Image: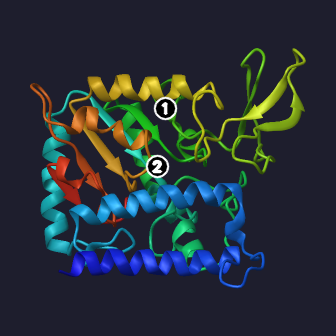
Amino acid sequence: NPLPVKMKCLRDCWNGLHQLCTGNETGKPGECTWTSKEYEEYELEFQKYVSQNLQNQSPAEDFATEHWDDAEVLRGKLRLLQCLCQNANYIVVFTGAGISTSAGLPDYRGPQGVWTRKLKGERVSDDLGLDDSWQPSSAHMAIARLHSKGFIKFVATTNVDDLHGKSGVPEDSLAELHGNSFVEECEKCLQRYKRSFVTRSATGLFEHHTGRYCQCGGPLRDTIVNFGNTFEHVPSMEDQHDAAWVHCLKADLVLVLGSSLSVPTACDLPEECLEPREGKQDGGIVNLQRTPKDFLASLRIFASCDD
């Protein structure tokens, strides 16, 4: 059976690479970018994801493998997507890193993703190289136009790049589930400040103070949700999560664009609509890699979001 062999191979590979980083083979401390607190959290998340992912998929359909629908198949699926949208009364769009790759930003779990490259031992910056010069992709702009026309009711995203905001989606129609790199908020009065620069300067997973202060005197904190963070660490994210949850409950169609749907608890939100219920349509997923939620979607498109 190739599945247990694949799982064993992945675990052996992981353990061997981890030993090189920790120095377990030599007894000497390892020197590696993996020895950060954040990477320890990622290790747990990655192992859980791989285990769950490969239980439902064959080894040839690993999360790092891209799949592309050919032109004829894609045209047929897009016609079906058009019908789903035309018959829907309440559309919610849920986006991940894949929607921003055409804008020049990397994803996380694709073949050239941040975490995929880290697994290969490459030195990769976690800050994604973000600055205020990045511009929305054509997919971002299309979503904003459809929202302005009333076709899309709400947008939820796990991205921290602010590109949905830049495209014109208003704050009251947008949930940034993992925060916004250009926002900091007051620990005391919760006043939010939008900046032209990345606000996060802390290095620890549970550290969020930026070193700046609010007009009320309270310390300012970034809004980035790191691995292991809860609402206790980023209080404003509870409102973001709750807003997305309510809109997904109200939706009769959720369209997932560019998300691996693998990081809880955000990845579970589309299921509020994706799980078939009376009066609900199934949702659609557009992503180049297979996801653990594919079986819930009536329409699965393997293409870039801009297609």
Q: Which mark is residue 128?
A: none
Q: Is residue 153 above or below residue 133?
A: above
Of residues 280 and 230, which is closer to you in this image? 230
Q: 144 or 192: nearer the eye?
A: 192
Q: Is 146 left or right of 20, judged from the image as shown? A: left
The residue type indicated by label 2 comes to His
Position in image of residue 109 (x %, y %)? 46, 65
Q: Residue at x 15, y 42 (%)?
A: 84
* Residue linked to disc 1: 174
Q: Is residue 17 above or below residue 97?
A: below
Instruction: Work out how far the residue at label 2 is from the one at label 1, CA to CA, in angstroms.
Output: 12 Å
Residue density around tag 1, few if under 14, some if 14–19, many if 20 or more, within 10 Å = many
Counting from the top left corner in percent of width and height, residue 81 is at 18, 50
Residue indicated by mark 2: 140
Residue at 18% over, 52% down: 295
Q: Is residue 51 left or right of residue 264?
A: left
* Residue sitting at x 58%, y 47%: 227
Q: Which element carries disc 2, helix, strand or loop?
A: helix
